[in-house]
Image: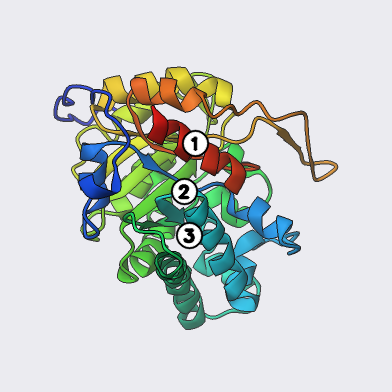
Amino acid sequence: MTSDTPRPAPAPAPTPADACPADACPADASLAEALAAGTVVLDGGMSNQLEAAGHDLSDELWSARLLAERPEAITEAHLAYFEAGADVAITSSYQATFEGFAHRGIGREEAARLLALSVGLARDAARQARDNGVTRPLWVAASAGPYGAMLADGSEYRGRYGLSVDELERFHRPRLEALAAAAPDVLALETVPDADEAEALLRAVRGLGVPVWLSYSITGDRTRAGQPLEEAFALAGGRDEVIAVGVNCCVPEDVDAAVATAARVTGKPVVVYPNSGEVWDADTRAWRGRSTFAAEEVLRWRESGARLIGGCCRVGPEVVASIARTLGAA
C-alpha cells in the first residue's frame, strides 16, 4: 500500500440532504450530480434474487454463469429492483473475469462480449422499468469484484493473496477496460478486502473516463485484511474519478462508524450496502442466523454522510422498497 504518497487535503464532509426527488434530478443527470442533490437508492443482492427465481448458482462463476446461459434472468432481477425503488442497478459482473471464463473454456473475445452484456442487460431493465411507468432517473454501475472472487475459495474475504500491487493492477485492468467500453454510468469497485488491492484498482481505472466508487468489505473498524479504515479510505481522498467511497458486504452493525470515518477522511459522498446480517457457513454452504438489517437505520447513515444506500447479500426487493420509502418519506 502506498500510504506515504502525498494526497490533496480532503474537502469538508458532505452535509445531510433529502432524497433526490424525480423533478430535482433530470433524466440525463449524472450519478455524481444526483449525489450532489441528495440520496440515491442502490439495489440489493443479485444472487439471492436469482436464487429466489429458481436458478442454481453453485458454480465458480456464480451469477456470472447466467450471462452466457440465461441472460434474461439477469434482466428480470434488475427490473425487480428498479420497480422496488432502486435508482442504481449493479451489474452481474462481480465474478466475471477473463481468467474465470477461461477456466470454463470461454475465450477472451466471448468473455469481453459477456462483460459488456452485463451492462447491456441492466440498461435493458432500465428501459423496461420506464416502459412500466418508472419516471425517475436510473443508473447502471458495472461491478468489479476483487481478485479473490475469481478464485472462488473465500479469499475475497481475506485479501493478502501474495500478489504485488502491480500484479493486481495487471489483473484488473483488462476487465475494467471491457466494462468501461460498455459505457456504464459508474464502475463499482466493490467488496474490496485489502487496501493494497484498492490501490491496484485505483491505478487500473486511470484514464478510462468512467467515474468509480470504491467499497471495502470490512470487519469492525478494519478491512478484511486488517488495515485501519482511515488508511484504506484515505487512498481515495484525492482521486477525482472517485465519486463515492464506503463499505459493502459487511454486517449492518459495522456500518455507522465506517460511514462517519469515510466521510471525515475523504470528504466524498459515502456508499453503503451491507448484508442482511446473516452469516454464510462455508462448510454447509448455507446462511445462518437472522437478519439484523432495519430500514430505519438508513436515516442515521444518511445523517453521517451516506448518499448511495442499498443492500448486498440476502437483501432483496422488499427491503430495497422499504429503504426507498424510508428515505423518500424523511
Locate residue 182: give its quadrant.
bottom left
Determine the residue positioned at 21% across, 60% down.
28
Q: In this picture, is 281 found above or below 84? A: above
Looking at the picture, does residue 308 appear above or below residue 99? Answer: above
The residue at which mark 3 appears reads as: 91
Closest to the observer, 34 or 244: 34
Label annotation for residue 323: 1
Please identify the quarter of the rendering in which residue 2 is found: top left
Find residue 311 and name its label: none
Q: Which residue is mark 2?
A: 85
Which quadrant is home to the N terminus? top left
Query: With respect to residue 230, does 90 lie above or below?
Result: below
Tag 1's secondary structure? helix
Q: Amino acid at mark 2?
A: Gly
Mark 3 Cα shell of 10 Å, populated few (<14), some (14-19), many (≥20): many
x and y percentages locating residue 153 in the rendered image: 68, 49
The answer to whether marks 1 and 2 mark residues whose Cβ atoms lie closer than 8 Å is yes
Instruction: Report crowding for label 1: few under 14, some 14 to 19, many 20 or more residues within 10 A (C-alpha).
Output: many
Res 62 visible? yes
Mark closer to the chain start, 3 or 1: 3
